[in-house]
Image (cartoon, rainbow, N blue to C red):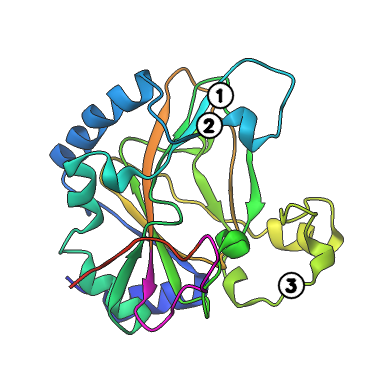
Amino acid sequence: MLLNNIQLKEFHENGFLVIKNFAQKDLCDEILKATQKHIENMIEPIESEQEYLAETNTTKTTLRRLRQVYDREEIFRTWMTNKDIRPILEQILEEKAVLTLAHHNSIMTKMPKDSSRTTWHQDRRYWHFENDNLVSVWLALDEEYLENGLLEFIPGSHKIDFTKEQFDDKTNFLDDNAKNIELIHKAAHTNLEKGDVVLFHCRTLHAANKNITDKAKISFVYTVRGVSNKPLKGTRSDFKEVILD
């Protein structure tokens, strides 16, 4: 499968693209079933909401993501090396794709009531590669909409050269910066259903609300780089990878 010219143009212009009904629903259900035991038992490595918010004066632990999922279950590896999506990734990257396990490689959760807002940011903020030719693959394992923490994107933000004053010291895009407010008003979203995939560039600004529903939202995300775009030696990005032949 390849993107048509309209889809490819949309990705390059907006920095993200939704592909409806890409993954089989049976696959999503199998991934969800395998995920449940890791969530219920809080199997490490994980990231908690408290860690994300830097809350140190609490003993509560609310799961935010399961990390390093490639090595957890065969069904996770099956999805991350899916042959049907590989031509699309190569089409966007304009070269062979490499699965980088240092970043994303996660099952993301928005737990009901206890989740936090994910502020506006670019994923490349903690990444260290020779260039920004990286794309993330987001799989909706069930319905996703604004009330349960659907991703929103700012179209075209991957092409903008921002100043450091537009970010805080944690590299979050500031909500109250005058230039930022104008951009944030242009935010776009598409409700997702089980099996939908979102592709987005590592420079594309995105955010998500907290989950105010009574049901957990669980999603799968991984990232690929172009084969020529090497991780910088001695950084956290210099980690195990999988070449998608």
The vertical placement of 158 against 61, above or below, is: below
Secondary structure under badge 2? helix
Q: Which residue was labeled with disc 3? A: 162
Q: Are marks 3 and 1 in contact (CB under 8 Å)?
A: no
* Labelled disc at residue 212: 1
**At which x and y percent is residue 174?**
78, 54
- Name the quarter where the C terminus is drawn: bottom left
Residue type pointed to by label 3: Phe
Q: What are the residue bounds of the magenta stretch?
A: 224-236
- Name the quarter where the N terminus is drawn: bottom left
Mark 3 vs 2, N-terminal side: 2
Q: Which residue was labeled with disc 2? A: 147
Secondary structure under badge 1? loop
Outermost residue toward the front? 234
Query: Closest to the observer: 61 or 191?
Result: 61
Using the rendered image of the protein, determine whether residue 154 is visible from the camera's viewpoint: no
Q: Are marks 3 and 2 in contact (CB under 8 Å)?
A: no
In magenta stretch: residue 203: no
Mark 2 vs 1, N-terminal side: 2
Whole-Å distance between the Cαs marked 3 and 2?
29 Å
Q: Quadrant of residue 115?
A: top right
**At which x and y percent is residue 127?**
55, 64
Residue type pointed to by label 1: Ile
Query: Closest to the observer: 135 or 159?
Result: 135
